[in-house]
Image (cartoon, grey):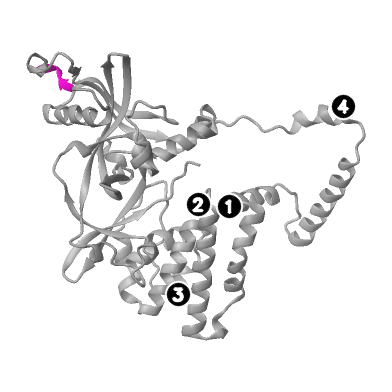
């Protein structure tokens, strides 16, 4: 099992798990974060072929529920799906292993739905509670009763404060508990209001309705390494001309070198760009093969439309670049990425190999060929179209080897 785990290439910010996980004792020292990584990243890939059909159903339902519940934001529909998955999982365990295997933890997981409705996403709830409880002073001997006493004292203070009649005094005290300004990577989010965030995230999720051109603002910035004011190769420049032709309706574009044979209305596209190796979106950093040290963070997902349908493709960012386009109404700077996209597996069933009851939603990994499409206009996308990152693994079906694509939940919220 540890040999399979070593084939999964995990980005540095995700964290790794101990490789000695082939026995029951190997799991005893796992932290909560290591458990999360094992379930969401490793479990399906390294155990699928070792499990019976009934156990696969238990695993798939549990992984799907965990994938929803550990997100920083959870929709009501997602929460309901997670509850149904956990309920199905518990019923399958009872059916296959008997009621004596229904532990208190399995019973408690069925109350997560109502807990999240009352207190919000589990990520924020547990982080908030850990920070709150950790701030209380204890003797490190009888922690539980001491915490209960502290909570009881705080509830009495809340009752007293609710009876305060001096509103001027209360108003003067309120600024003392005002939220502090954020700093570091979180401060990036203060530059954009809620509407900006919704619009930005919608561009990657609703490409059929809100596809961006790359000139829109985004909550982040490009990072080193960089190469300023350099020329794009002719092949990529031609693809950029085609990209602008599709991004802007009723406009004609041409590479500057071909302007003498173009129509008078054609807009010249200059070859000068600023190339970057990394991109920060909120608190999440996306790398590229231009920055060799961070290649594991260069693997992204993006959606494309095919007629009335849309599909998600995995790829590796080759580099990010800024390009200024001089339009009749004024100049616009575009934030773009050049990506090589993987080819899909041989057929639909192979791609969604790890699924139960023909449910695609039950599969948290997809299988793709370790081959790239040829260069095309689709290799250039706005950074707004980046759906998220994925972790690459290795998976064998019969005698054929594929890469396993394991999506990572976005850190931005």
Looking at marks 2 and 1 on the same chain, the residue that comes earlier in the sequence is marked by: 2
At 11% across and 16% down in the image, what residue appears?
Answer: 259
Q: Left or right? Give the position of 162 relative to 272.
A: right
Q: Nearer the viewer, mark 3 or mark 2?
A: 2
The residues tagged by marks 3 and 2 sit, at their Cα atoms, a distance apart of 28 Å
**Secondary structure found at label 2:** loop
Residue behind mark 3? 24
Mark carried by residue 71:
2
Please tell me how crowded label 3 is: few (under 14), some (14-19), or many (20+) other residues with Cα within 10 Å: few
Q: Nearer the viewer, mark 1 or mark 3?
A: 1
Q: Left or right? Give the position of 372 relative to 207.
A: left
Q: Quadrant of the N terminus?
A: bottom left
Q: Are marks 2 and 1 in contact (CB under 8 Å)?
A: yes
The residues tagged by marks 2 and 4 sit, at their Cα atoms, a distance apart of 41 Å
Please tell me how crowded label 1 is: few (under 14), some (14-19), or many (20+) other residues with Cα within 10 Å: many
Which residues fall within the magenta stretch? 253-257
The residues tagged by marks 2 and 1 sit, at their Cα atoms, a distance apart of 7 Å
Q: Left or right? Give the position of 131 relative to 277.
A: right
Mark carried by residue 121:
1
Looking at marks 2 and 4 on the same chain, the residue that comes earlier in the sequence is marked by: 2
Residue 334 percent across, percent down from the top left: 31, 25
Residue behind mark 4? 168
């Amino acid at each position: 099992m540890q040999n399979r785990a070593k084939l999964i290439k995990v980005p540095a910010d995700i964290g790794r798990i101990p490789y000695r996980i082939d026995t029951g004792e190997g799991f005893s020292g796992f932290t909560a974060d290591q458990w999360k990584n094992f379930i969401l990243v490793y479990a399906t890939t390294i155990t699928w072929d070792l499990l019976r059909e009934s156990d696969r159903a238990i695993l798939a339902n549990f992984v799907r529920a965990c994938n929803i519940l550990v997100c920083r934001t959870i929709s009501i529909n997602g929460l309901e799906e997670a509850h149904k998955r956990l309920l199905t999982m518990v019923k399958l365990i009872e059916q296959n292993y008997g009621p004596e295997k229904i532990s208190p933890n399995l019973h408690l997981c069925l109350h997560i739905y109502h807990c999240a409705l009352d207190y919000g996403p589990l990520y924020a709830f547990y982080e908030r509670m850990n920070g709150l409880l950790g701030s209380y002073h204890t003797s490190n001997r009888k922690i539980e009763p001491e915490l209960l006493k502290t909570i009881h004292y705080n509830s009495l203070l809340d009752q007293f404060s609710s009876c305060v009649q001096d509103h001027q005094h209360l108003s003067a005290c309120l600024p003392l508990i005002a939220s502090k300004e954020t700093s570091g990577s979180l401060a990036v989010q203060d530059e954009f209001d809620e509407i900006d965030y919704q619009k930005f995230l919608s561009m990657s999720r609703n490409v059929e309705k809100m596809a961006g051109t790359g000139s829109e603002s985004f909550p982040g910035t490009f990072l080193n390494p960089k190469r300023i004011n350099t020329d794009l190769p002719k092949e990529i420049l031609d693809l950029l001309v085609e990209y602008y032709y599709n991004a802007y309706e009723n406009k004609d574009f041409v590479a500057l070198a071909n302007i003498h044979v173009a129509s008078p209305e054609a807009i010249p596209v200059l070859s000068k760009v600023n190339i970057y190796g990394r991109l920060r979106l909120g608190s999440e950093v996306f790398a590229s093969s231009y920055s060799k040290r961070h290649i594991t963070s260069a693997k992204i997902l993006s959606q494309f439309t095919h007629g009335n349908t849309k599909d998600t493709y995995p790829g590796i960012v080759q580099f990010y670049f800024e390009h200024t386009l001089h339009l009749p109404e004024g100049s616009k700077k575009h934030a773009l990425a050049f990506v090589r996209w993987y080819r899909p597996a041989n057929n639909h069933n192979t791609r969604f190999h790890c699924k139960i009851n023909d449910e695609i939603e039950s599969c948290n990994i997809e299988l793709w060929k370790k081959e790239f499409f040829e260069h095309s206009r689709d290799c250039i996308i706005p950074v707004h179209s980046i759906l998220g990152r994925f972790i690459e693994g290795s998976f064998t079906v019969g005698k054929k080897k594929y890469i396993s694509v394991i999506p990572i939940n976005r850190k931005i919220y």
